Amino acid sequence: MTITLHAGDLPAGLSFGDCVAIDTESMGLNWDRDRLCLVQLSSGDGNAHLVQLSQERYEAPNLKKLMADPKVMKLFHFARADLAAIYRWLGVMPQPVYCTKIASVLVRTFTDRHSLKDLSKSLISIDLSKEQQTSDWGAPVLTQDQMTYAASDVLYLHKLKAKLDEMLVREGRTELARKVMDFLPVRAELDVLGWRDVDVFSHKPTRRPD
């Protein structure tokens, strides 16, 4: 495994093929307050590229171009949060998207365990460490442990997608999954614009109870 750290943007000409696994790390989950710090990417070849973003600069033209490329599938786990962070801080909404968590919820109805750690252990026998999940991603210098953790969140998404796609076909839910994932960018935009905790489809839209 090779982990390459880039400052501020991807290098020009770097290709991830027709499907790129993506994850993000932020200072928190309040997108008005908590800045986007890191974007991790992998083509599924066992290598990861990490883009460290400065709070003064979010131009990242090469990264934004990739996010907006309609010919490249963007592969996430729990895409809703990552899409919102990217949209809020980079000003671009990744499309098209695939979310392994949504695929898992649609086909692994025998369990309520749909985290990346649970999926990786169950489907591909890989036990991911989550020790660095709540570390300081805004630090100017990332530790090797942080970079290894960040890379692990994208290295196996292609393998998980392949397993989940087989299950979606088996259960006849491929088209349903596609429709749900097509709506994800809209759901993320609603989150950023203030409807994060509101069910806009409810007869009486109210905030969810804490």
Image (cartoon, grey):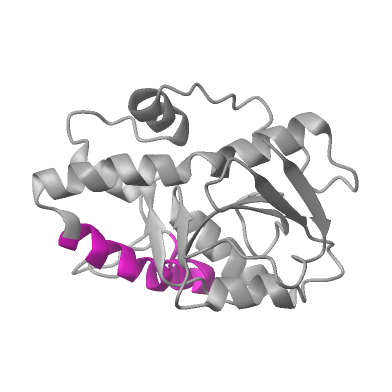
Magenta-tinted stretch: 175-196
Which picture quadrant has residue 65? bottom right
Q: Is residue 188 magenta?
A: yes
Looking at the image, residue 174 sits to the left or right of residue 71; the answer is left
| Quadrant where the N terminus is found in the figure | top right
**Which of 61 and 85 lies nearest the eye of the viewer?**
61
Left or right, residue 156 beside residue 36 = left
Residue 91 shows up from this direction: no
In percent of width and height, residue 22 lies at 56, 54
Does the segment drawn in magenta span residue 92?
no
Q: Residue at x 77, y 71 (%)?
A: 58
Residue at position x 28%, y 31% in the image: 112
Main SS of the magenta part reads helix
- State left or right for residue 185 relative to residue 92: left
Q: Quadrant of the C terminus?
A: top left
200 relative to 58 in the view: left or right: left
Residue 88: x and y in percent read 62, 70
Please determine whether, in this image, residue 68 is positioned above or below residue 118: below
The answer to whether residue 125 is above or below residue 171 is above
Location of residue 77 in the rendering, given as x and y in whole percent from the top left corner: 45, 47
Residue 61, visible in the rendered structure: yes
Image location of residue 170, percent across then percent down? 11, 44
As displayed, is residue 195 above or below residue 50?
below
Q: Quadrant of residue 167?
A: top left
